[in-house]
Amino acid sequence: MIGIAIGGFLGAITRYLFYLFVESRAWQPKVATWLVNSLGSFVLGLLIGSGSLSVFWITGFLGAFTTFSTMALDVVKDMEDGKWLKGGFYITATLTSGIALFSLGYILMQ
């Protein structure tokens, strides 16, 4: 449990710092959300592919680093603003890159 808590703390701080980095580049916040979810999927693939089932990394760090809820909020905001195509593209890009990068990480560790 302590490992999950420490991993969660570090994952949340890392995501926050990553968002600050993205903001300093004047990128859209959605870019940060997409990147953390894509990177998190890749790292999860690496960990699962290597047989590592560390609760520190998987449940703690990656659980706090990645964010499905922020992606969902972004999509709902787009739809409320009548930007259905933009929201649809964003959710499709997020799911596609997440699955593809998880698969790549998993395959690399086989």
Image (spheres, grey):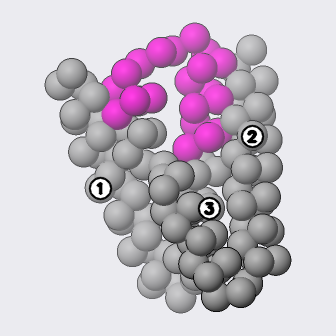
Q: Quadrant where the C terminus lies?
A: top right
Give amino acid for label 2: Ile
Residue at image position (76%, 31%) is: 103
**Up/down of 69 relative to 8, above or below:** below
**Boundaries of the magenta span:** 40-60
**90 drawn magenta:** no
Give amino acid for label 1: Ile
Give amino acid for label 3: Trp
User: Cα distance, mark 1 to mark 3?
Assistant: 17 Å
- Is residue 108 visible in this depiction of the protein? no
The chief SS type of the magenta part is helix
Label 3: few (<14), some (14–19) or many (≥20) C-alpha neighbours in 10 Å: many
Question: Foreground: 75 or 48?
Answer: 75
Check disc 2 and report the residue beneath it. Answer: 99
User: Cα distance, mark 3 to mark 2?
Assistant: 13 Å
Q: Is label 3 in a helix, a strand or a loop?
A: helix
Occupied quadrant, residue 47: top right
Question: Foreground: 53 or 73?
Answer: 73
| Viewer-side label of 2, 1 | 2
Q: Is residue 70 left or right of residue 9?
A: right
Q: Which disc is residue 34 wearing?
A: 3
Sooner in the amino-acid sequence: mark 1 or mark 3: 1
Question: Percent x, y for residue 41?
Answer: 62, 40
Q: Is label 2 in a helix, a strand or a loop?
A: helix
Q: Which disc is residue 13 wearing?
A: 1
Q: Is residue 62 left or right of residue 10?
A: right
**Up/down of 56 relative to 80, above or below:** above
**Up/down of 104 relative to 86, above or below:** above
